[in-house]
Image (cartoon, rainbow, N blue to C red):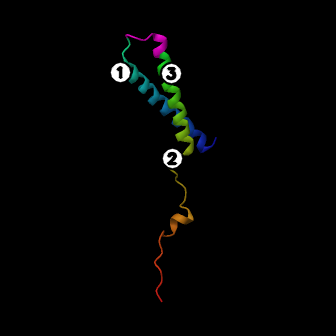
Amino acid sequence: MSQEFWSAIKGSAVGMIIGFVFGIVTLGTMGLDRITLFQGALLVSCAMFGGFLFGALIGVTGAFRKDSGELTENARRPAFHSPKLA
Protein backbone atom coordinates (compact mmCIF):
# COMPACT_ATOMS: atom_id res chain seq x y z
CA MET A 1 0.00 0.00 0.00
CA SER A 2 1.13 3.55 -0.63
CA GLN A 3 2.74 5.91 1.83
CA GLU A 4 -0.18 8.33 1.51
CA PHE A 5 -2.66 5.61 2.46
CA TRP A 6 -0.80 4.69 5.65
CA SER A 7 -0.36 8.36 6.51
CA ALA A 8 -4.13 8.85 6.13
CA ILE A 9 -4.84 5.82 8.35
CA LYS A 10 -2.49 7.04 11.06
CA GLY A 11 -3.83 10.58 10.86
CA SER A 12 -7.43 9.43 11.07
CA ALA A 13 -6.70 7.31 14.14
CA VAL A 14 -5.05 10.23 15.92
CA GLY A 15 -7.86 12.54 14.81
CA MET A 16 -10.48 10.15 16.17
CA ILE A 17 -8.76 10.06 19.55
CA ILE A 18 -8.56 13.86 19.63
CA GLY A 19 -12.23 14.06 18.62
CA PHE A 20 -13.21 11.67 21.41
CA VAL A 21 -11.35 13.74 23.99
CA PHE A 22 -12.91 16.92 22.60
CA GLY A 23 -16.40 15.41 22.80
CA ILE A 24 -15.92 14.27 26.40
CA VAL A 25 -14.55 17.67 27.42
CA THR A 26 -17.49 19.38 25.71
CA LEU A 27 -19.91 17.14 27.60
CA GLY A 28 -18.12 17.89 30.84
CA THR A 29 -18.37 21.61 30.17
CA MET A 30 -22.07 21.48 29.27
CA GLY A 31 -23.03 19.22 32.10
CA LEU A 32 -25.03 16.01 31.84
CA ASP A 33 -28.12 17.14 33.74
CA ARG A 34 -29.92 18.65 30.73
CA ILE A 35 -29.19 16.14 27.97
CA THR A 36 -30.04 12.49 27.48
CA LEU A 37 -27.59 9.67 27.01
CA PHE A 38 -28.43 9.50 23.30
CA GLN A 39 -27.66 13.20 22.82
CA GLY A 40 -24.36 12.84 24.65
CA ALA A 41 -23.38 9.81 22.59
CA LEU A 42 -24.37 11.64 19.41
CA LEU A 43 -22.23 14.65 20.34
CA VAL A 44 -19.19 12.48 21.09
CA SER A 45 -19.62 10.41 17.93
CA CYS A 46 -19.93 13.54 15.76
CA ALA A 47 -16.76 14.94 17.35
CA MET A 48 -14.99 11.64 16.65
CA PHE A 49 -16.18 11.64 13.04
CA GLY A 50 -14.98 15.20 12.53
CA GLY A 51 -11.61 14.30 14.01
CA PHE A 52 -11.44 11.24 11.77
CA LEU A 53 -12.04 13.30 8.62
CA PHE A 54 -9.67 16.08 9.61
CA GLY A 55 -6.95 13.62 10.60
CA ALA A 56 -7.28 11.73 7.32
CA LEU A 57 -7.05 14.99 5.39
CA ILE A 58 -3.94 16.09 7.25
CA GLY A 59 -2.42 12.62 6.95
CA VAL A 60 -2.96 12.21 3.22
CA THR A 61 -1.59 15.65 2.37
CA GLY A 62 1.55 14.84 4.30
CA ALA A 63 1.63 18.03 6.32
CA PHE A 64 3.59 16.37 9.14
CA ARG A 65 5.28 13.58 7.18
CA LYS A 66 9.05 13.15 7.28
CA ASP A 67 10.52 12.14 3.95
CA SER A 68 13.84 10.36 4.18
CA GLY A 69 14.49 10.56 0.46
CA GLU A 70 17.30 12.35 -1.31
CA LEU A 71 17.43 16.09 -1.57
CA THR A 72 15.96 17.56 -4.70
CA GLU A 73 18.05 19.53 -7.15
CA ASN A 74 16.56 22.82 -5.93
CA ALA A 75 17.55 22.05 -2.35
CA ARG A 76 21.16 21.34 -3.36
CA ARG A 77 21.64 24.70 -5.06
CA PRO A 78 21.94 27.85 -3.03
CA ALA A 79 18.83 29.99 -3.15
CA PHE A 80 20.56 33.29 -3.81
CA HIS A 81 23.36 33.95 -6.25
CA SER A 82 25.59 36.97 -5.89
CA PRO A 83 25.85 38.95 -9.07
CA LYS A 84 29.25 38.98 -10.69
CA LEU A 85 30.73 42.40 -11.04
CA ALA A 86 32.72 43.10 -14.16
Q: Amino acid at mark 1?
A: Thr
Give the vertical position of 21 relative to 4 (above or below).
Answer: above
Residue at 59% in and 44% down: 3
Residue located 46% across and 28% down the image? 19
Circles 1, 3 touching at the beta carbon (< 8 Å) = no
Contact? badges 3 and 2 (CB < 8 Å)? no
Q: Mark 1 = which residue?
A: 29
Q: Position of residue 28 (x, y in %)?
A: 36, 19
The residue that mark 3 highlights is 45
> Camera-side residue: 26 or 24?
26
- Circle 1 Cα neighbour tier, 10 Å, few/some/many (<14 / 14–19 / ≥20): few
Tell me: residue 71, above or below residue 46.
Answer: below
Q: CA distance from mark 1 to mark 3?
A: 17 Å
Q: Quadrant of residue 74?
A: bottom right
Membership of 2 in magenta stretch: no
Q: Is residue 11 above or below residue 71?
A: above
Q: Is residue 41 left or right of residue 73?
A: left
Q: CA distance from mark 3 to mark 2?
A: 27 Å
Tell me which label, 1 or 3, sits earlier in the chain. 1
Identified by mark 2, the residue type is Arg
Q: Which residues are magenta?
A: 33-40
Distance between the alpha carbons at the discs numbered 2 and 1: 34 Å
